[in-house]
Image: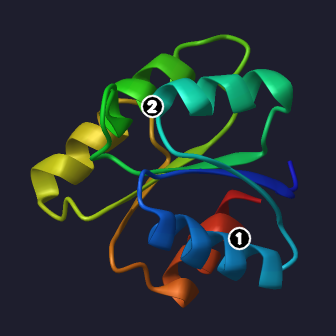
Amino acid sequence: MAIHKVLVVDDSKTELMFLSDLLRKNGFSVATAENADDAMRRLGEDKPDLILMDVVMPGQNGFQLTRAISRDPQFADVPIIMCTSKNQETDRVWGMRQGARDYVTKPVDATELLSKIKALN
């Protein structure tokens, strides 16, 4: 499945802008969400081909949201890349256990992120 539409979920406006600009410059269509409720609403409006998920957010965190999305039959086929400042190996393992396909730590390395997205295609 080719990846065209990406949903970026992050409570930081700076991160949303950085990731959105990076993705758009590389030909992706981008939607953004600042929390779990926003993300679920966006999912319902237009199913993305990929989700970039922050972990530390107010309300439901990215681990919980990843688990909910990856277990929902309607969205289970949408790959999720955790994109977070949580850089411990235990965080990475936990994220993958929740259903993430990959894990990138902040500050995000553009080349690394794009190669991980390409690997999903």
Q: Is residue 78 left or right of residue 85?
A: right
Location of the C terminus by quadrant is: bottom right
Question: Is there CB contact under 8 Å for labels 1 and 2?
Answer: no
At 50% from the left edge and 47% from the top edge, which residue is drawn?
101
Task: Measuring from the top left, give residue 80's x and y in whole percent.
Answer: 55, 44
Task: State the image coordinates of residue 116 (x, y, percent, origin top left).
Answer: 57, 69
The residue beneath circle 2 is: 66
Residue depicted at 23% across the width and 38% down the height: 94
Q: SS class of the residue under badge 2?
A: helix
- Please identify the quarter of the rendering in which residue 96 is found: top left
Quarter-wise, where is residue 118 in the image? bottom right
| Residue that extends furthest to the front in the rendered view of this protein | 13
Q: Nearer the viewer, residue 38 or 106?
A: 38
User: Is tag 1's residue or tag 2's residue first in the polypeptide sequence?
Assistant: 2
Left or right: residue 92 compared with residue 76: left
Name the mark on residue 51.
none
Q: Amino acid at mark 2?
A: Thr
Q: Position of residue 44 (x, y in %)?
A: 77, 21
Tag 2: Cα neighbours inside 10 Å, few (<14), some, or many (≥20)? many
Instruction: Look at 81% across and 32% down and name the residue there.
Output: 47
Q: Please tell me in which quadrant of the rendered image residue 41 appears.
A: top right
Q: Residue at x 42, y 78 (%)?
A: 108
Is 4 positioned to the left or the right of 21 in the image? right
The answer to whether 49 is drawn above or below residue 27 in the figure is above
* Circle 1: residue type: Lys
Residue topped by disc 1: 118
Image location (x, y in percent) of residue 49: 78, 45
Estimate the spatial distance between the alpha carbons at disc 1 and disc 2, rounded to whole Å: 20 Å
Secondary structure state at the residue bearing disc 1? helix
**Front-most of residues 32 and 65:** 32
